[in-house]
Amino acid sequence: MLSLEEARDRLLAAVRSVTETETVPLWEGLDRILAEDLHAPRAVPPADNAAMDGYALRAAEGAHEGGLALAGTATAGGPFSGTVPAGQCVRIMTGALIPAGCDAVIMQEECDVSGQGCTTRVRLMRPPRSGEHIRRAGEDVAAGACLLGAGRRLRPPDIGVLASLGLADVTVLRRPRVALLSTGSELREPGEPLAEGQIYDSNRYLLTAMLRRLDVAVTDLGICADAPDHLQAVLEGAARDHDVVIASGGVSVGEADHTRRVLDRIGRVRAYKVAMKPGKPFTFGTVGAALFLGLPGNPVSATVTFHQLALPALRYLAGERSSESPLLVAARAGAPLRKKPGRADFQRAVLLAEPDGGHRVETTGSQGSGVLSSLTRANAFIRLEAASGDVAAGDTVSVLPFDRWLM
Ligand code: AMP
Ligand code: MG
């Protein structure tokens, strides 16, 4: 049995990342993977401008007894033209270009303004400092700077930064093509009536929802009954035009669990059984050029193995490269936890902030791998290392808060 880390490493080593690119309008860049390093084609802001509403002037003249005369106005988008004459200042609004000759902006709250029109005098309540309240050209982004690296999954602020650089489109990697099926002769679609012994397929719905967040192209292959020839035909067909085929169910050792045998026949099993709970029967392999991921059928096991193993593989396959590892929170266990040494454990739990600034964590109760509703009650996993045994109330444990893939 592989440790979770070994399984993940082996899985990533078997992945060939997407390399084909496409250029999409900036609007569609969200959640896509940046194909190449992004260097700023220009500086942001492009020129020195006012950080406050007030008066632009020469700092050296600010102490003038009689104040400064008003030479004109500069607004954002409406610059003052020419050089400001000696002894004069310019009324300036936030974002307006600093007029030639000026080297400071004084907040209007710190100015005493008298007179009107050409008799206006602006007196300062304190001596100005050269450079104050000026946003320098390039202080946000220097021209040529490498802002975002290839492999970045674009976030809302990234889209804003690209827009600030004037870029109307962005070159991203093509979306991975993922085929998804459920195996099990007992499964029915929601909306259909259930006969005796049947249950609804929940895995395909849950996994499709997670795949949507991942922004991959999903082909829904529906439910495949526990018939090896049929399963073989479905897998072979899907492997031809998808990067990844994901199936849940049929990877245990029961008589109706055909997935691994079929995979052996038409491709290669590269790993089977991972020392994790839930999720031990997780299987992966290849069929032709496609990666095959076999998730256990129990819905919690399918979810945890998808989250811990399939997701890193799919993100890597999509070309995503990130040095951020998942944040773990240290929290006090609110009650004792049962744990047999041997497998890494993911217990569904609620992470709570405590008044002292610390954290407490409570499990959602029954940890059966079929108790799917435990995931809707939880906001985190208690992550117990393979070697760990029982945990006493009050012990500090590692907690993995649900991320965007599970929330
Ligand atoms: P299996 O891994 O196929 O042996 O399935 C283990 C358990 O999970 C069985 O009780 C199945 O009925 C259940 N199961 C398998 N696939 C699904 C699914 N897609 N939705 C809900 N339950 C499932
Ligand atoms: Mg089954």
Image (cartoon, helix red, strand yellow):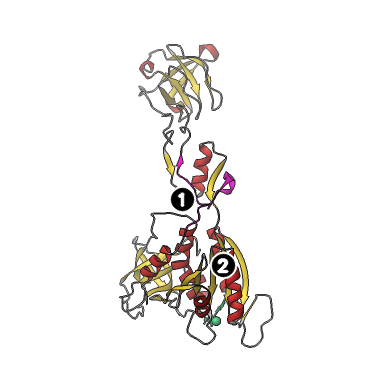
Does the beta carbon of the residue at mark 1 sit less than 8 Å from ligand 1?
A: no
Magenta residues span 16-39
- In depth, the one of 214 and 99 nearer the eye is 214
Residue 74, above or below 28: above
- In depth, the one of 134 and 32 nearer the eye is 32
Q: Is residue 162 visible?
A: yes
Looking at the rendered image, the quarter that the N terminus falls into is: bottom left
Q: Tag 2's secondary structure?
A: helix
Residue 50, above or below 252: above
Residue flagged by tag 1: what amino acid is it? Arg
Q: Which residue is drawn at the image coordinates 36% and 69% (left, top)?
A: 6
Image location (x, y in percent) of residue 133: 41, 29
Image location (x, y in percent) of residue 91: 50, 21
Badge 1: how crowded within 10 Å, few (<14), some, or many (20+)? many
The numbered dot on residue 239 is 2
Q: Is residue 35 magenta?
A: yes
Residue flagged by tag 2: what amino acid is it? Ala
**Of the image marks 1 and 2, the number of the one nearer the N terminus:** 1
Q: Nearer the viewer, mark 1 or mark 2?
A: 2
Q: Quadrant of ligand 1?
A: bottom right
- In depth, the one of 131 and 8 nearer the eye is 8
Name the residue carrying label 1.
152
Dividing the picture into quarters, in which one does residue 192 lie? bottom right
Q: Is residue 281 magenta?
A: no
